[in-house]
Amino acid sequence: MEAMSEEKPQPSRRRPPPRTLSARTTRRALIAVAVGAVVAAIATIAIAGGFGDNDNLRQNAAPGSGSSRGDSEFAAAQQGDCLNWTPSDDPAEDRQDVAIVDCSEEHLFEVVAPLDLSVYPGAEFGPGSRFPGSLRFASIRDEHCVGAVEDYLGGRFDPHGKYSVGLMFPSEQGWADGDRTLRCGLQFSSTTGTLLPSTGSVRESDQSNVWPPGTCIGINQNVPSDPVDCAESHAYEVISTVDMGTHFTGGMPSVEDQDAFLKDVCTQASNEYLGAADALRNKTLTLFWDNLDLDSWLAGSRQINCSVGKELDTGGFASITGSAKGDILINGEAPVPPPPVGEGRATPVPLPGAAPIGG
């Protein structure tokens, strides 16, 4: 089976507080990576005749290929079941051990609704029909799975949250052997489309798109990619998770109200995480955060991350190595602290035409 995820719409906002990188910039970076992943997927299809491991598509072995347990487990999966398997870069080995697991355990896919194309009228999906391909499966996902997810979650799906809509479908060989079993579902995928393990049913989870503090998000051509060890090149480091619901207990706060609250909260988090109030400035880093929009708020998402990175004047991020808690390199060089801020009374700027100060 293969699994196709839905590309999430990204809202567009900008805010002006100093020493912050806008949510819009961050989201634009994520969009750029997502588009790159789609292009990579199309290239993989054209060159290899199948899908690799990082393009949102997952393939099940064909019946009779020695993975009967995985096939039967997938065929038995019903709404609310969670599926897990051992990912592999080798297509012949990947997804050979698909199994239904308790959703409290790590899993890669949560089934929202079964979909049997064999009952559809017409010849498109009938015996001997041509394998639909990625574009047709994408339209099937959009036609059937998006609505199924909304029903499954009672209309509380966060389109900007942690989870994406997915569709698991037969491999091309499985299709040729008559397999028409599909499953709509939810999955947690990285920026570049790699499926990541999650625990707990989405029905009972906060869908906020956040990472644990201390997570470093990798970098690819100046835009964020997947989580990496902080010793590797990365775009930014998550320093805290903020629960907006503890402060905003009524309706959704405006972006301006969110920023006013987060500016102080994230600054305090930065001081504590980095160990000093002047550490952010001395390391020439940028403090930034995201905003919650109405779709996320109505879905129940309340958490956001405060993060630190290095914004480039040309857009995107500089490459950082090392955790911001210690010594770091920015684009391979140690940051040079700016001149200290003067203490005491500042020398006033002379008015136009006034005699020079001290003259």
Image (cartoon, rainbow, N blue to C red):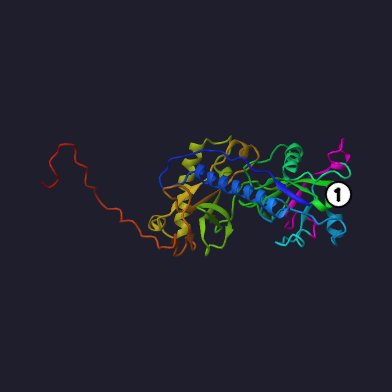
Q: Quadrant of residue 114?
A: top right
Left or right of 331: which side holds 1? right
Quarter occupied by residue 157: top right
In this image, 39 relative to 63: left or right?
Answer: left
x and y percent of residue 300 in the render?
A: 64, 41
Instruction: Residue 332: say if magenta.
Output: no
Is any atom of residue 149 visible in this view?
no
Question: Which residue sits at x=66%, y=48%?
Answer: 42
Count of picture labels? 1
Asked whether residue 241 appears in the rendered view, the answer is: yes
Q: Is residue 15 above or below residue 170?
A: above
Above or below 11: residue 42: below
Residue at the far left: name it: 359
Q: Which residues are magenta?
A: 96-125
Q: How crowded is the residue under tag 1: few (<14 C-alpha within 10 Å), some, or many (20+)?
A: many
Residue at image x 43%, y 47%? 314
Q: Residue at x 46, y 55 (%)?
A: 318
- Quick check: is 111 in the magenta stretch? yes
How far across and how far down the image is residue 36, in percent? 59, 49
Q: Residue at x 88, y 59 (%)?
A: 64
The amino acid pointed to by label 1 is: Asp
Question: Depth check: 91 or 211 in front?
Answer: 91
Q: Where is residue 93 shown, x and y percent of the image?
A: 76, 62
Q: Which residue is mark 1?
A: 179
